[in-house]
Image (cartoon, helix red, strand yellow):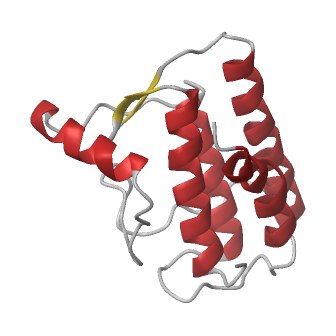
Amino acid sequence: MDQDKLNFITNDFVAKTKTRQPGSFGKWGKMNAQQMVEHVSGFFKISTNQLHFPLVSPAEQLPKLKAFLLSDKEFRENTKAPVLPEEPIPVTYTSFQDALSELEAQINLFVAKFSSGEIVISQHPVFGDLNFEEWVLLHYKHVIHHAKQFGLV
């Protein structure tokens, strides 16, 4: 388990994100800061089986995708998730603070559910079945991607 990556996810990312204005935009992409926060919350809901998307990757591509996940390679700018619409999803929370509180809750739920053994494996629509350590790597790649997008690191 990479404790530094887990620490960035559980502590640093939300703290750094709080420094942004909700309507501010990143260096690339179409989402504003609040849309990004709500998007990242949704990503955590996938790892805790609260949101489900069908597997979109062919089985023969999963080893290559897993190798990327386990590597130090980052997501490229403007990487688009194949299960999301072309335009950003409108915000659902009435305030940026509420969206940030939900993100913190989802991160804490992710750690709690895997730590308790309630969830051992859950499916990501691109990378397939992932365990806790693999989800930590994927969540880290994801939050670093958005932290760079919004100038947080």
Quick one: 40 or 94, which is closer to the camera? 40
Asked whether the viewer can see residue 94, the reply is: no
Which residue occupies 63% across, 66% down?
35
Quick one: 41 or 149, which is closer to the camera? 149
Outermost residue on the left side: it is 60
Which residue occupies 60% across, 35% down?
45
Residue 132 lies, with reference to residue 93, above or below; the image says: above
Along the horizontal axis of the image, is 129 left or right of 42? left
Residue 116 coordinates in the image, percent (x, y): 74, 13
Residue 103 coordinates in the image, percent (x, y): 76, 49
Residue 4 lies, with reference to residue 55, above or below; the image says: below
Along the horizontal axis of the image, is 119 left or right of 18? left
Along the horizontal axis of the image, is 49 left or right of 80? right
Along the horizontal axis of the image, is 129 left or right of 14? left
Quick one: 91 or 12, which is closer to the camera? 12
Residue 46 lies, with reference to residue 23, above or below; the image says: above
